[in-house]
Amino acid sequence: MSEKYFLNCRTCRSVISPDKIHVQCPQCGKRLEICYNRYDVVKKDYPGIWAYVDLLPVTAHTHIVSLGEGNTPLTESKNVGEDLGLERLFFKNESLNPTWSFKDRCMSVGVSVVKEYNKSTVVTASSGNAAVSLAAYSAAAQLECYAFVQDTISPAKLNQLTAYGAHVSIVERRKKGDPTVLAMEEMVKTHEMVPVPSFGLYNPYQQEGAKTISYEVCSQLCEVPDWVIVPVGSGSLLCGVWKGFKEFLEAGVIQEVPKLLGVQAEGCSPVVDAFVEKRKVQMCENPHTVASGLIDPYPWDGDAALEAVTESNGYCMTVTDEEILQAQALLASKEGIFGGPTGVVSVAGVGKAVVGDIIRGDELIVCLVTESGLKELPAQFFHKDSVVAGSSQRMKCEGDFNG
């Protein structure tokens, strides 16, 4: 492999050559980060995230596995911003990726790396979206995919997983430890599978996909937002978003970086708790929330996410399930964007941040909407008074609709 990039250990500062797929530091077993020998940002004639191929860890373009991920719309609020007293509110709609979540950016990179190193079998531990995405990209690359998912996974996500041909195991949660991760580790040890979860401790390549969100936001706005609001589960997305802005800063594309607002569900908030109490992230006991994609009892990238928030002079907060469902309904009915509960946590957060005087009305705000509402349809979302009661017979319509 050419020395386009190298891997750096965030803990012991070891520098590792990309002679093979490295998922953890070979010296201390801690989290790795990918660094590039040059930070020249010249967009190439490739679709989506691969327009930034020079800053992605794939050497041969023939190894790229893409389903058209990235280049998602950044739309200015038509109604919600005005209701909240925000002059410039934007939504980055990641629900329009191929499997309906931002994870497609991560898995396109992850599977491309696997293909580049000529591996054939991958395994993941996931609350849902990452497994679905890995299964889809594995199907495209004709890799064998094993997925260990939490028992909180929605039926829609489970249907996607099986449709893409993954080998799926549903694992019951425990009070201590993450059984999906333990199962993934065992498969890596005993069957030499490549781990491709969406968190950085076991996959330094995934946040390279997530960081392209920041590249696109800067390119689409032609300026840097004041705030980027990010749903937080394991913390990997927040880490990737921050890495993207820092790389654009280092490359001279932008002259400043935004503040990050990390938002977690109240029923699973280990990162926010650590932020408030100024300590290391600890495991969340008995997590529960309608935002099932954010049920990460131990956020593997939590401490790195806290570093990103601190470096950006940002903030962390929680929102309740009621606020999440209200945000979901608001975004759909006033903006025409149907996000899932996990995906709209950022929207719930922006309203709370305005009320708490964290965000000013004249600031430029970008909310990341990270998944489609088709991923999970909680019964609470639907309003009975919006449904017209009637018989099971088809309604008759007058007039000619053929012209």
Image (cartoon, rainbow, N blue to C red):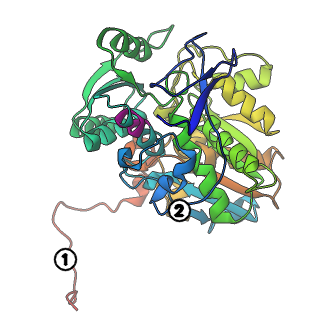
Quadrant where the C terminus lies? Answer: bottom left
Residue with the mark numbered 2: 73
Disc number for residue 28: none
Q: What amino acid is labelled 2 in the image?
A: Pro
Magenta range is 110-115
Query: Which residue is outermost to the bottom?
Result: 403
Q: Nearer the viewer, residue 201 or 128?
A: 201
- Spatial separation of the CA atoms under disc 2 and disc 1: 38 Å
Q: Residue at x 64, y 55 (%)?
A: 41
Q: Quadrant of residue 108?
A: top left
Residue 105 position, x and y percent, is: 47, 45
Q: Which residue is mark 1?
A: 396
* Magenta stretch contains residue 90: no
Of 226 and 218, nearer the camera is 218
- Residue 82, percent across and down? 71, 65
Identify which residue, 381 or 340, lies in the foreground: 340
User: What amino acid is at disc 1?
Assistant: Lys
Q: Are marks 2 and 1 in contact (CB under 8 Å)?
A: no
Can residue 269 be seen in this snapshot? no
**Left or right: 117 with respect to 368?**
left
> Of 164 and 365, which appears nearest the observer?
164
Task: Tell me the SS state at disc 1.
Answer: loop
Residue at 30%, 60% in the rendered image: 389
The earlier-in-sequence mark between 2 and 1 is: 2
Q: Residues within 10 Å of mark 2 (few under 14, many from 20)?
A: some
Q: In the structure shown, which secondary structural element does the residue marked by tag 2 occupy?
A: loop
**Numbered disc total:** 2
Residue farthest along the left direction in this orientation: 393
Viewer-nearest of discs 2 and 1: 2
Q: Position of residue 38 (x, y in %)?
A: 66, 45
Residue at x 57% of width, y 39% of height: 322
Q: Is residue 359 visible?
A: yes
